[in-house]
Amino acid sequence: MNQISRYFARWSALSRADQRTVLVAGAGMPIFWLGLRVLGLPRFQAILECRLVGCSRSMPLAKIQAMGELVNIAARHTLGPRTCLTRSLLLGWLLQRRGVMSQLRIGVRLTQGALEAHAWVEYEGIPVNDRPDVSAQFASFGNLIPLKTFQAP
């Protein structure tokens, strides 16, 4: 029962807007995961982008990063799959609905001979839903990837 009261206390500490963001993200997570599986990334992204209005407003970086954390919180408490790509697409969509232009980044790295991929969202080149050094850990497809990245040490 103590854990439930801690969750309730954390929930109560959130503003109404933040609670709404967590609820929308939690409900959207399975929908976005399914959309990716059924339509694939390019078609799903096209659908998300065509239904949104142009970006004209801006938010402070701290508020954008807080929204990234709220989406991550929702992902941790959502049933079903919640990949980094699903979380990042959902965050990008939420930001764009608020008039904030962000970039989805997909990067790769070679770890002990295995290729790993990861997705995150950046605002003005700054990761907002991941570690600050994520772009140093993964070579983003948005950047030129040096050939040595794919060679085993």
Image (cartoon, helix red, strand yellow):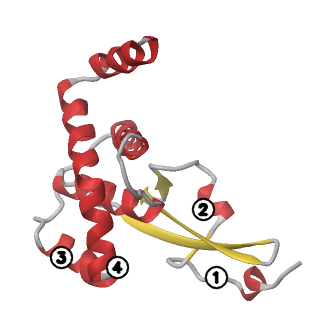
Callout 3 amino acid: Ile
Task: Write down the quadrant of residue 15 in the picture.
Answer: top left
Q: Residue at x 27, y 75 (%)?
A: 45
| Separation (CA) of disc 1 from disc 2 | 12 Å
Callout 2 amino acid: Ser
User: In this figure, which residue is indicated by the disc labeled 4?
Assistant: 41
- Of residue 60 and residue 84, the one placed in the foreground of this image is 84
State the mark number for residue 135: 2
> Do the residues bearing badges 3 and 2 touch, measured as CB atoms within 8 Å?
no
Give the side of residue 40 with respect to residue 2, left or right. Answer: left
User: In this figure, which residue is indicated by the disc labeled 1?
Assistant: 145
| Separation (CA) of disc 3 from disc 2 | 27 Å
Seen from this angle, which residue lies furthest right?
153
Callout 1 amino acid: Ile
* Element type where label 1 sits in the image: loop
Task: Write down the quadrant of residue 33 in the picture.
Answer: bottom left
Tell me which numbered mark, 3 or 1, is placed earlier along the sequence.
3
> Do the residues bearing badges 4 and 3 touch, measured as CB atoms within 8 Å?
no
